[in-house]
Image (tube, rainbow, N blue to C red):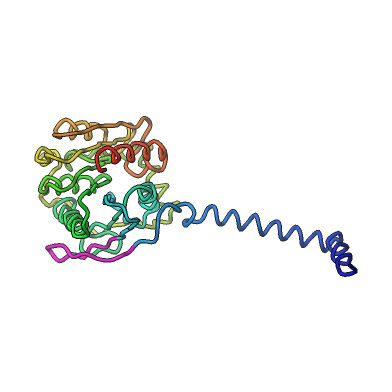
């Protein structure tokens, strides 16, 4: 009893009040750090198995494989200047892993992959190599979620094979030479701001000659017969205007759908500013076409 009374007096003293204040502050900081840590923000993901694949032209392609035991897999293809370590690519993975196994990779010339980016000349080989890997793991239901020039590469690859069941193609240019480059529009400054805010983490590319002759999705998409395709574009995209998605949609065969996001910007900005709408669109689409 004397010890309990002494402890009570200590807590009522100024020193005791200070100790309680410190403990309260420490608890609040602990909760804040936990809630806003990457592990919590992407709690629906798991630790990936990482590795490299080799393309037919001997380029090493780095990938992360999130395996949760589903019988279907979605391959995420980042856009130009983004690696799999970009925070919005992490957000994309987190969006998917509640329902699908996921493989995300770095295109050549990006992140941990080798080689140089060829602006659409050989990038379909990167997609092809990753799809082959997914098939070798036993997946019969393979989907693709691709951004911008990554979507161009996905279309070009899907035109040459028949085992991709479904694709979500976000801000995909119909023709490389028709990309808009409206640098004066607000969306460009939002892209630049995000790069600076993220301290350029997961950003950057090593490139080849931009004038290499390349395939355009508008010329290959008509060869895709059995792949369902959802086209998503931002109304306020500064670099790939919605007309690109409209042209691709019109040229596509089979089951297809197009969505233009009101006040939406380019590619991963759609995930940044319209996350819930994008999640609903993407998961609803795959639930119909990949199950």
From the top left corner, tell me how far across and down residue 143 is, in percent.
24, 47
Q: Quadrant of the C terminus?
A: top left
- In the depicted structure, whether residue 204 falls above or below residue 267: below
Residue 57: say if magenta.
yes
Q: Residue at x 86, y 59 (%)?
A: 12
Q: Quadrant of residue 84?
A: bottom left
Is residue 275 among the parts visible in the rendering? yes
> What is the residue that sits farthest to the bottom in this orientation?
3
Q: Residue at x 32, y 37 (%)?
A: 284
Q: Nearer the viewer, residue 244 or 286?
A: 286
From the top left corner, tell me how far across and down residue 68 is, in percent.
35, 56
Is residue 80 among the parts visible in the rendering? no
Q: Nearer the viewer, residue 131 or 245?
A: 131
Q: Nearer the viewer, residue 210 or 146?
A: 146
From the top left corner, tell me how far across and down residue 175 is, in percent.
16, 40
Q: Is residue 237 left or right of residue 163?
A: right
From the top left corner, tell me how far across and down residue 51 is, in percent.
28, 66
Q: Residue at x 28, y 45 (%)?
A: 147
Q: Residue at x 49, y 54 (%)?
A: 40
- In the depicted structure, whether residue 274 falls above or below residue 157: above
Q: Nearer the viewer, residue 12 or 232?
A: 12
What's the magenta region?
Answer: 49-63
Magenta segment main secondary structure: strand
């Amino acid at each position: 009893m004397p010890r309990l009374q002494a402890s009570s007096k200590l807590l009522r003293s100024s020193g005791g009040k200070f100790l309680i204040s410190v403990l309260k502050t420490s608890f609040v900081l602990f909760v804040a750090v936990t809630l806003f840590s990457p592990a919590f923000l992407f709690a629906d993901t798991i630790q990936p198995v990482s590795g490299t694949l080799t393309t037919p032209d001997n380029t090493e392609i780095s990938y992360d494989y999130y395996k949760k035991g589903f019988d279907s897999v979605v391959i995420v293809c980042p856009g130009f200047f983004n690696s799999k370590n970009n925070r919005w690519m992490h957000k994309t993975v987190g969006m998917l892993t509640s329902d699908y196994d996921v493989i995300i990779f770095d295109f050549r010339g990006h992140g941990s992959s080798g080689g140089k980016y060829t602006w659409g000349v050989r990038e379909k080989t990167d997609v092809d190599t990753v799809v082959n890997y997914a098939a070798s793991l036993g997946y019969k239901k393979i989907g693709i979620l691709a951004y911008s020039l990554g979507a161009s590469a996905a279309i070009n690859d899907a035109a040459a094979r028949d085992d991709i069941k479904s694709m979500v193609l976000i801000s995909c240019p119909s023709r490389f030479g028709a990309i808009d480059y409206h640098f004066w529009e607000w969306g460009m400054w939002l892209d630049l701001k995000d790069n600076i805010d993220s301290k350029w983490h997961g950003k950057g590319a090593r490139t080849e000659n931009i004038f290499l002759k390349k395939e355009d999705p508008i010329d290959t998409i008509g060869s895709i017969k059995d792949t369902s395709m959802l086209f998503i574009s931002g109304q306020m995209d500064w670099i790939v205007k919605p007309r690109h998605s409209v042209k691709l949609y019109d040229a596509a065969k089979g089951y297809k759908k197009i969505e233009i996001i009101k006040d939406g910007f380019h590619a991963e900005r759609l995930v940044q500013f319209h996350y819930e709408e994008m999640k609903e669109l993407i998961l609803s689409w795959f639930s119909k076409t990949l199950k």
